[in-house]
Amino acid sequence: YEHGQIDGRPRMYTEMLEQPASVERALRGRLDERFATAHLGGLEMDARALRAVRRVKILGCGSAYYVGQMGASLVEELARVPADAEAASEFRYRDPVIEPDTLYVAVSQSGETIDTLLAVEEIKRKGGHVIGLVNVVGSAIARACDGGIYLHAGPEIAVASTKALTTMYVGFALLALQLGRVRDLSVADGRRLVAGLQALPAQIEQVLDGEERIAEAAKALAAAESLFFVGRVRGYPVAREGAQKFKEISYRHAEAYQMSELKHGPLALISPEVPTVAIVPDDELTDRNVAALHEIDARGGPLVVITHAGVDLGELRAERIDVPRNERELDPLLLTVPLQLLAYHAALTLGHDVDKPRNLAKSVTVE
Ligand code: G6P
């Protein structure tokens, strides 16, 4: 091993490639085809307790926070329970109101992030119920929570989170499905989502197979000093996570923006020197998204579009990267994977040590 490398490849690379297997593990034994639902025994909450949940509040730091935002969308879409995510690092400083019928969810790969642990303690001190979405078994956060979901991603060494992140997404999808099915989510929708989840490992493999093309796009992006990542609604946390990964390992300024907010400010910065990576799934918002991209194109801004085959980008001058379609609600996971490869190849092009980005630690355990 050199810098934790395996076969001369950075750990981040081998961890990205492990994702079909880690997602498979995260799903194993948790899907129930007969009742079109998920079973998360570790939650230690029966159907009655799940039906009593009036709100879901998700807390995490860094990538765990962004995947928490994706999780909040899943909970709202599948269970129709109001949900949102907040940076755990800010939470305790604002003397948060803790509600008895809110389900709090702490998300953490390491289970040792001090900000997330202190958020859990704040919730518990005020009488709230908190579950963990944690990778490391027996970690501090896992022990502090009232129950939870282990991710089974396997050890993650690289600072930039890849396989832990995709299993976190799966954890949220399972939680949202179970929460949905004890409420109003239909059997038909449950079946559709169970099948969608089962399809994910092979579809992640397909995205990874497209590495060469993504590496080409990354080389062009690496030349820019500054870039935007944009998405709308479901696509926005994907853009946030993509920008985070890009800045963590390439040291380029990458800023995530809501597609609909572009015209309220950042459009002023768009030029041939400032590329944009856009998340444009095939959904009810595609046309609006494509229209916003035309505004960027008209100002000479280079575009890389992460999208689905069949999405008509019209006359847009853009590099497109197609990912396989899943169920709409589950699309964010597959849209995230090319962004990992994009950041990885940009960092390699710039000659950086992707596993040990400067100034960053894998887990931040001191205040
Ligand atoms: C650090 C890492 C991030 C990570 C965050 C949360 O800041 O640099 O990559 O997302 O901690 O880590 P956790 O172990 O709680 O998921």
Image (spheres, grey):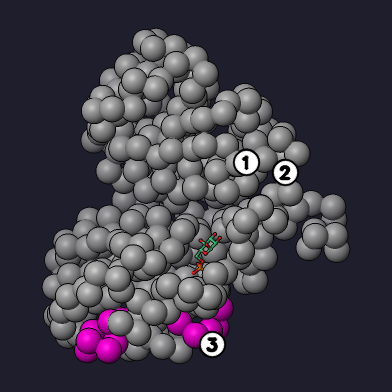
Residue on which the image places disc 2: 352
Q: CA distance from mark 3 to mark 1?
A: 33 Å
Residue on which the image places disc 3: 138
The residue nearer to you, when weighing 88 against 288, is: 88
- Where 48 falls versus 12 (above or below)? below
The residue shown at (43%, 38%) is 255
Q: Residues within 10 Å of mark 2 (few under 14, many from 20)?
A: some
Residue on which the image places disc 1: 250
- Where 222 falls versus 337 (above or below)? above
* Helix, strand or loop under label 1: helix
Residue type, mark 3 in image: Gly
Whether the residue under disc 2 has CB within 8 Å of ligand 1: no
**Can residue 248 be seen?**
yes
The residue shown at (66%, 28%) is 219
- Point out the frontmost of discs 3 and 2: 2
Residues marked 2 and 1 touching at CB (< 8 Å): yes
Q: Which residues are magenta?
A: 123-141
